[in-house]
Image (cartoon, grey):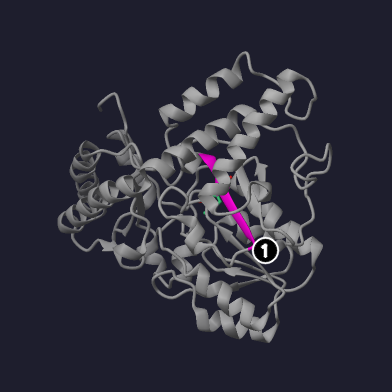
Amino acid sequence: MPDQPVYLDHAATTPLRPAARAAMLPWLGERFGNPSGAHRVARAARQAIDEARDVVAEVVGCRPGDVVFTSGGTEADNLAVLGAHEARPGPVLCSAVEHEAVLRPVHAVGGRTVPVDRHGVVDLDALAALVRDAPPTLVSVMVANNETGALQPVDEVAEVVRRWAPEATVHADAVQATAWVPLPERLAGVDLVSISSHKVGGPQGVGALVVRPGTPLRPRALGGGQERELRSGTHDVAGIVGFAAALQEVLRERDATAARVRALRDRLADGLLARIPGAVETGPPREERLPGTLHLCVPGVESEALLFLLDEDGVCASAASACASGAQQASHVLAAMGVPAELARGALRLSLGWSSSAADVDRALASVPAAAARLREVAA
Ligand code: PLP
């Protein structure tokens, strides 16, 4: 096994970008102030956070004052769903393929899910029927799915909701999409937007919820009243600074990285489909997916065993359905798409990102087919 693992799990988390690390270091050392204070050390920290807020605002397409920093995408999603529901109780809808960070709070408040088509894309007719049936106060649909990379028609979702439930709040989880697609043009009709630092080359444990003016929202964390009373707690200054530095890199090189990674992903996909008999690519056509995501189902192979062999060979991948304990469980995304359970058992997600190289693809093209063939041999 080579020393450096082949990292093909960018949808789980991304390596820290050097620019983010460099930007963070002073804030882990001599610049340690609490931004809520009044003296110069505190003021320096507050200024750093305000500058980071400007960067988030540019990425999402909002006012700096709309940004609420959180401990990550999960907290942003929870604040969006539970905070909006508490501010205005009523029927809640989300797509059936949302991340658990949306799905579970939606279920907790008795919400319902909107079906998706076989590509994993929200069924707009089904959405319209559900909205007409019981006009919701909140609808949540992700910009791109974390398992398949499928892009969702968030603008059309917002349009349907506005037609039948003009007062409803619309939330979009943009955690997976931020590194790849310009958000302002996709999210114009959306009231709440979740983003996360560690999916864009920033540090783990930082994120933000964008709250457009006038959106009814109750806080979940009560305390010192930071973030316009919407999220109390002392800021993670270094994390927020690193998040902003990573986002600046995204703004600078997103299009170039997306084109480069898309070509790598397509070569990987074509190569694996040619080398693994019966393998199927999951999700919508490639151009309607995130450039870095490749999701396959390999018949006759168990994901867990495949991931084990790949890991032994130094290739880090995922089935995209691991729970926090690391154990595999059936994917609700594949189930919602109607993928037969038999096929879903052989799910494999290979996700590329800013640090991915042609050498990574070459290694995966050698390793994945060999591992699949070995498992099929054993099973035969
Ligand atoms: N939403 C989506 C779509 C995700 O993919 C993830 C992480 O995998 C999250 C939310 C949670 O974000 P975080 O890990 O920052 O809590």
Q: Is residue 50 above or below residue 102?
A: above
Residue at 63%, 13% in the rendered image: 30
Q: Is residue 152 above or below residue 328?
A: below
In this view of the protein, which residue sits in the foreground, 147 or 152? 152
Q: Quadrant of the N terminus?
A: top left
Q: Is residue 207 above or below residue 105?
A: above
Residue at 68%, 64% in the rendered image: 107
Q: Position of residue 349 (x, y in %)?
A: 36, 51
Q: Position of residue 33 (x, y in %)?
A: 71, 21
Q: Of all residues shown, which one is farthest toward the left?
A: 274
Q: Quadrant of the C terminus?
A: bottom left
Judged from the image, the secondary structure of the residue bearing numbered disc 1 is: helix
Residue 323 in sight in this render: no
Looking at the image, residue 22 sits to the left or right of residue 207; the answer is left
The three-letter code of the residue at mark 1 reads Val
Q: Position of residue 213 (x, y in %)?
A: 71, 58
Secondary structure mainly formed by the magenta segment:
strand
Residue 334 in sight in this render: yes
Q: Of all residues shown, which one is farthest toward the top?
A: 30
Looking at the image, residue 78 sits to the left or right of residue 294; the answer is right
Specify the segment rendered in magenta. 191-197
Q: Is residue 176 shown in magenta?
A: no
In this view of the protein, which residue sits in the foreground, 228 or 85? 228
Q: Is residue 196 shown in magenta?
A: yes
Q: Residues within 10 Å of mark 1 (few under 14, many from 20)?
A: many
Residue at 43%, 44% in the rendered image: 251
Residue marked by disc 1? 106
